[in-house]
Image: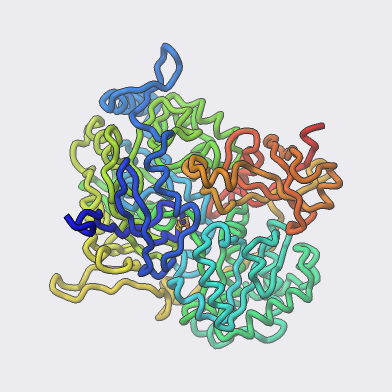
């Protein structure tokens, strides 16, 4: 046969990692893996991939990949190979026993923002219909929940970006708050580069002079946890200089007077004292922002992962609204969601307080609609449960058995040593994962599951664009999909029907369950996703079967906000301190984050040789003045001690960080685990823990 005929077909799909969901083509290359071929047609990344995406195929054929189920044997206390039948039976027994002894809410479910929409949907339904438990939440709570809460509060609806990324280069000014996208999602940086090439300006707010901040026209470096005050100071100046958009405020918003009064109490000099950002820099930022014909404010984990994250994001939204930069072309507020399906993962029912379609679990009409699709009595559906950290904190106490999919809280949860202790205190733990993660190591049963290139399913990227990930290769023998695990467990627990294993069938049900809800997927089909470059929700069904298909909604709020009166809501917010302030015993601020070569808890990327070589372990980034005070030099081990524990990692001495702050990436377990130190103080609205600010002291580890 000619060579072309022998070449396996290209399968267009998307990266398994972050919320950019970069497009790529896959070609089966034998030995259970795939080769990536550039895919230029997808507008988000136009062919570019970061190192994580480029090396993702390595995890498919990794030697450390799980090849069969594991069950912990009482005789040895070790996880040992088992058949699927045994692993499923032991799990069904473990879940059933906890429920029989302690009630339905003694069984918990913990999901992940990396699960496809179909899996997130099936997991939420499994928890509420099969287990009858309210105790379900997911690691997305640790990701963008504050932005989601603030977005909903102000606009009546939460979609990460209410506009496509393609709009970014065409606006006049972008304020990027607490995002280092040069490291977290490098292909997105080109949208900012093009913005500046087009004459637009970029303001970056970050305590560190990151690679992203280096691209900015203006870099503001506030003390961690003070960006709420920074936003208020900017709004104060906007008002004082008469640069508000009064007509927009009058016609399209409510609550301005209260928000204005709150901002006016934050004098620039006071804001300088709180944040460490000088008044001249504040004025320069206002000039850049207000001189632009249109502007965008984009936030990420920096302002969001705080015990006042919702109000902090709210302060930035107020700034956008006061200047007329929302609900108009080429302007608006948006959140750069983190995980691959961080957006879709929060829309379809694995969140403690929500049902599919982004419906509220305590809304009688929502319960009625979803219960009808599920074929159950609405009264049988449990109410809202605990948020992620609260659920983890309850393990071994009220919650005695846990089913966990697609998450590794031993590394990624705050106060991680405590979370590890709670996981160990469970009567029963089952984990579904690709590798033996640090959390899976603690389990009684481990299910080995399929990966991105081995299964079909949808994700929803940071723009609210629903995408189809396609299966390109057959999974290895002995591996099953998460949907197959849920199907089998549901059967053993008395629900033979209602948990199909075919993703397209699950998606069909998800469409019906989401129909009429805020995140309406009813008009989106696999066929459309194959033919189009994704479809933006909301996308309701065509009015009549033969009617024109709804085109989807790339841009939200242009004709009005999703509130009952169509107006955006200002919310008055004021500065308050972080959950834990520095003092004589803990005089330095710790902030945590990411590096370009690792992803989240590192469960996959730490197992890729190239990524491991590029980022082999944690470090403590610190200013030379602080390093001199502690008595460490670059590369020397330094101990970071908080009220929750101690972590040790080499010092990385650099002038790109404030002298009162240290930074640690959180991707690693063990001695250098940054989350041993972090503070689980929760935001009262979003229940987001305070990953970005806690008080620590530094000690020479080699002393
Ligand atoms: Fe994958 Fe994100 Fe990297 Fe794109 S930026 S290749 S989606 S990890």
Q: Residue furthest top?
A: 75
Residue 551's spot in the image, x, y percent?
28, 74
Q: Which residue is pictured at 55% across the width and 88% down the height?
A: 247
Instruction: Name the residue nearer the viewer: 255 or 304.
Output: 304
Q: Which residue is pictured at 21% across the width and 44% down the height?
A: 500
Whether residue 565 appears in this view of the structure is no
Q: Which residue is pictured at 41% across the width and 38% down the height?
A: 62
Q: Is residue 597 left or right of residue 633?
A: left
Residue 494's spot in the image, x, y percent?
22, 32
Q: Is residue 18 left or right of residue 524?
A: right
Quarter the N terminus occupies? bottom left
Q: How many marks?
A: 0
Query: With respect to residue 107, does 33 lie above or below?
Result: below
Residue 86's spot in the image, x, y percent?
29, 23
Query: With respect to residue 597, does 220 lie above or below?
Result: below
Q: Which residue is pictured at 51% across the width and 49% down the height?
A: 599
Q: Residue furthest left?
A: 546
Whether residue 389 appears in this view of the structure is yes
Q: Place residue 570 in its image quadrant.
A: bottom right
Name the colouring of the figure. Answer: rainbow
Residue 214's spot in the image, x, y percent?
67, 67
Instruction: Name the residue nearer the viewer: 692 or 638.
Output: 638
Instruction: Name the residue nearer the viewer: 179 or 1.
Output: 1
Quarter the C terminus occupies? top right
């Amino acid at each position: 046969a000619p060579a072309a005929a022998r070449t396996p077909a290209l399968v267009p799909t998307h990266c398994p990692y972050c919320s950019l969901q970069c497009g790529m083509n896959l070609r089966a290359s034998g030995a259970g893996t795939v080769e990536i071929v550039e895919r230029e047609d997808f507008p988000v990344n136009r062919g570019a991939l970061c190192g994580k995406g480029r090396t993702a195929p390595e995890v498919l054929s990794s030697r450390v990949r799980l090849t069969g189920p594991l069950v912990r044997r009482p005789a040895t206390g070790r996880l040992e190979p088992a058949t699927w039948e045994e692993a499923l039976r032991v799990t069904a027994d473990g879940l059933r026993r906890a429920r029989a002894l302690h009630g339905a809410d003694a069984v918990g479910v913990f999901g992940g923002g990396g699960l496809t929409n179909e899996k997130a949907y099936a997991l939420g339904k499994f928890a509420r219909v099969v287990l009858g438990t309210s105790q379900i939440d997911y690691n997305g709570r640790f990701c963008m929940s504050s932005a989601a809460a603030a977005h909903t509060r102000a606009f009546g609806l939460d979609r990460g970006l209410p506009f496509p990324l393609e709009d970014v280069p065409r606006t006049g000014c972008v304020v990027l708050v607490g995002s280092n996208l040069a490291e977290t999602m490098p292909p997105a940086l080109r949208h900012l580069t093009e913005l500046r090439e087009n004459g637009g300006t970029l303001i970056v707010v970050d305590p560190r002079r990151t690679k992203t901040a280096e691209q900015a026209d203006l870099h503001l470096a506030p003390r961690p946890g003070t960006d709420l005050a920074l936003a208020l100071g900017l709004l104060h100046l906007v008002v004082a200089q008469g640069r508000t958009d009064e007509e927009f405020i009058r016609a399209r918003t409510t609550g301005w007077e209260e928000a204005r009064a709150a901002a006016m109490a934050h004098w620039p000099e006071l804001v300088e004292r709180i944040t460490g950002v000088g008044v001249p820099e504040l004025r320069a930022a206002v000039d850049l922002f207000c001189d632009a014909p249109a502007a965008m404010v984009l936030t990420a984990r920096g302002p969001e992962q705080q015990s006042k994250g919702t109000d902090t994001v709210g302060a930035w939204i107020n700034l956008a609204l006061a200047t007329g930069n929302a609900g108009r072309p080429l302007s608006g507020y948006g959140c750069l969601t983190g995980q691959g399906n961080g957006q879709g993962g929060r829309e379809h029912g694995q969140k403690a307080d929500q049902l599919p379609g982004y419906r509220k679990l305590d809304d009688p009409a929502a319960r009625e609609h979803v219960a009808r699709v599920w074929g159950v009595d609405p009264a049988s559906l449990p109410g809202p449960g605990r948020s992620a950290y609260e659920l983890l904190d309850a393990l071994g106490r009220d919650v005695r058995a846990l089913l966990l999919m697609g998450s590794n809280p031993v590394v990624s949860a705050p106060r991680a040593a405590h979370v590890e202790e709670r996981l160990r205190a469970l009567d029963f733990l089952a984990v579904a994962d690709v590798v033996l993660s640090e959390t899976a190591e603690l389990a009684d049963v481990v299910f080995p599951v399929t990966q991105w290139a081995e299964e079909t399913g949808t994700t929803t990227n940071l723009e609210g664009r629903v995408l189809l990930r396609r299966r390109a290769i057959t999974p290895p023998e002995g591996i099953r999909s998460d949907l197959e695990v849920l199907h089998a467990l549901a059967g053993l627990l008395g629900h033979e029907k209602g948990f199909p294993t075919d993703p397209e069938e699950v998606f069909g049900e998800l469409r019906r369950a989401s129909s009429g809800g805020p995140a309406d997927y009813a008009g989106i089909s696999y066929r459309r996703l194959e033919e189009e470059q994704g479809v933006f929700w909301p996308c309701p069904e065509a009015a009549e079967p033969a009617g024109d298909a709804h085109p989807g909604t790339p841009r939200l709020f242009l004709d009005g906000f999703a509130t009952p009166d169509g107006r955006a809501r200002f919310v008055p917010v004021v500065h308050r301190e972080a959950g834990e302030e520095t003092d004589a015993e803990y005089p330095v601020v710790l902030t945590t984050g990411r590096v370009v070569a690792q992803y989240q808890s590192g469960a996959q990327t730490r197992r890729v040789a190239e990524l491991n070589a590029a980022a082999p372990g944690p470090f403590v980034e610190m200013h030379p003045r602080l390093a001199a005070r502690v008595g460490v030099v670059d590369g020397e081990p330094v101990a970071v001690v908080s009220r929750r524990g101690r972590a040790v990692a080499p010092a990385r001495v650099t002038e790109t960080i404030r002298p009162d702050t240290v930074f640690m990436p959180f991707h690693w377990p063990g001695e250098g685990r940054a989350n041993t130190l972090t503070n689980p103080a929760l935001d009262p609205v979003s229940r987001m823990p305070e990953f970005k600010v806690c008080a620590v002291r530094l000690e020479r580890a080699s002393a």
